[in-house]
Image (tube, grey):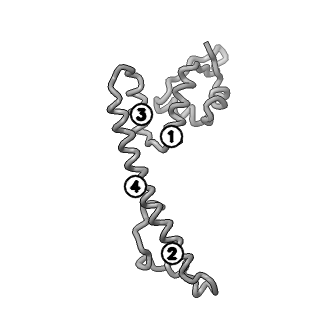
């Protein structure tokens, strides 16, 4: 059986030591057994779970979605529909952010293409940023 110190677990999973401790505190991973010297010792199951968490976080899943998926992953025989629903919801959120960022990109490009040469007093960027009504779209949620 593999046994990892918290430093080894961090190196193997790519998750920082303070984050591992935080995940223990909030119950995402179980508190590990400890050695006689009070050093945390983790097994392969904890490493796998931490890699799952790290990958899900990298993909932008909210903590509540992650907790739900972890709970569902423990019931191997359960239908996958609940996990699929979480992913469908996250995909919709990603699509919404892409739409917001695309509109924001267009607005920024428009600010630059509107005669940005000359002095700051004539600068289109400063002009648009000073008067939100000149913006072509709503972009506050993407910032």
* Crowding near the residue tagged with mark 2, few <14, some 14–19, many ≥20 C-alpha atoms within 10 Å: some
Mark 2 sits on what residue?
110
Task: Depth check: give the residue in front, 128 or 8.
Answer: 128
Quadrant where the N terminus sits is: top right
Q: Which of marks 4 and 3 is in front?
A: 4
Sequence-first disc among 2 and 3: 3
Mark 4 sits on what residue?
96
* Crowding near the residue tagged with mark 1, few <14, some 14–19, many ≥20 C-alpha atoms within 10 Å: some
Mark 3 sits on what residue?
67
Q: What whole-number distance in Å separates the C-alpha atoms at marks 1 and 4? A: 18 Å
Task: Depth check: give the residue in front, 48 or 103.
Answer: 103
Quadrant location of residue 6?
A: top right
Which mark identifies residue 57?
1
Q: What whole-number distance in Å separates the C-alpha atoms at marks 2 and 3? A: 41 Å
Where does the image place residue 86, in percent across and percent down from the top left?
37, 38
* Crowding near the residue tagged with mark 4, few <14, some 14–19, many ≥20 C-alpha atoms within 10 Å: few
Residue at disc 4, secondary structure: helix
Sequence-first disc among 1 and 4: 1
Q: Nearer the viewer, mark 2 or mark 1?
A: 2
């Amino acid at each position: 059986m593999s046994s990892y110190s918290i430093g080894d677990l961090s190196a193997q999973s790519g998750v920082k030591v303070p984050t591992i401790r935080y995940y223990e505190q909030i119950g995402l991973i179980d508190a590990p057994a400890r050695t006689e010297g009070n050093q945390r010792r983790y097994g392969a199951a904890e490493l796998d779970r931490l890699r799952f968490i790290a990958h899900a976080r990298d993909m932008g899943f909210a903590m509540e979605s992650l907790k739900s998926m972890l709970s569902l992953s423990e019931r191997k025989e359960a239908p996958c529909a609940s996990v699929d629903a979480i992913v469908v919801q996250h995909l919709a959120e990603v699509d919404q952010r892409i739409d917001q960022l695309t509109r924001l990109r267009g607005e920024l490009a428009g600010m630059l293409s509107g005669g940005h040469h000359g002095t700051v007093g004539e600068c289109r960027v400063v002009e648009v940023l000073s008067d939100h009504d000149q913006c072509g779209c709503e972009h506050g949620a993407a910032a």
